[in-house]
Amino acid sequence: MAKLLANRRGAPGISWRPQGTEELCEFVNSTNLHRRGPQVRFAIARTADDTIVGSVGFHSISMTHRSAEVAYDLHPDEWGRGLATAACRSVVGWAMTQGLTRIQATVLSGNQPSLRVLERSGFEFEGHLRKYRWVEGIAHDALMYSYVQT
């Protein structure tokens, strides 16, 4: 997973790049379901061999405002199979059962595959955020999407 996130060519839409396995392990170990915290992350694994091919979860969780931001990443070899969409739909459905009413997502404006995941998962476009994310020293625009429980 560290190699996936560090790979600029294979993961151009990811704005967080751990510097190595140690930093990634620290992040993973800080997120577990048995304590409340600002983030929760789940592995995406292939059913056939249980190999981890990505992750999906929430950060910026606010139980006060019943909201969170979803994020996901998937190894490029797994793109185009519907895994990210299935994972996104699944965690959003779960989050609604946990008392959240709003899930939002910010996507770098050029990341068309991620935009399709959100649209297929029932998210709606809310706005354009100028110079919102810094990636490799450059400010990038992002698009805000949301899924709101009705």
Image (tube, helix red, strand yellow):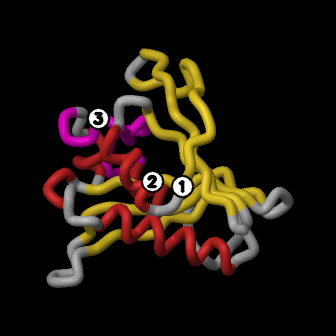
Q: Residue at x 61, y 51 (%)?
A: 146
Q: Determine which residue is flagged by label 3.
A: 12
- x and y percentages locating residue 54 in the rendered image: 31, 61
- x and y percentages locating residue 148 in the rendered image: 68, 60
Visible residue check, residue 38 = no
For residue 78, which quarter of the picture? bottom left
- x and y percentages locating residue 16 in the rendered image: 43, 39
Q: Nearer the viewer, residue 54 or 33?
A: 54
For residue 59, which quarter of the picture? bottom right
SS of the residue under disc 1: loop
Q: Determine which residue is flagged by label 1.
A: 123
Query: Callout 1, which amino acid?
Result: Phe
Q: Residue at x 79, y 63 (%)?
A: 63
For residue 30, which quarter of the picture? bottom right
Q: In the displayed structure, does residue 145 sit left or right of residue 45?
A: right
Q: In the displayed structure, does residue 27 sit left or right of residue 97?
A: left
Q: Is residue 10 above or below residue 73?
A: above
* Crowd rating for badge 1 (residues with CA inside 10 Å; few <14, some 14–19, many 20+): many
Secondary structure mainly formed by the magenta segment: loop
Query: Callout 2, which amino acid?
Result: Glu
Q: Determine which residue is flagged by label 2.
A: 119
Name the residue furthest top.
138
Write down the region rendered in magenta: 9-23
| Picture quarter with the C terminus | bottom right
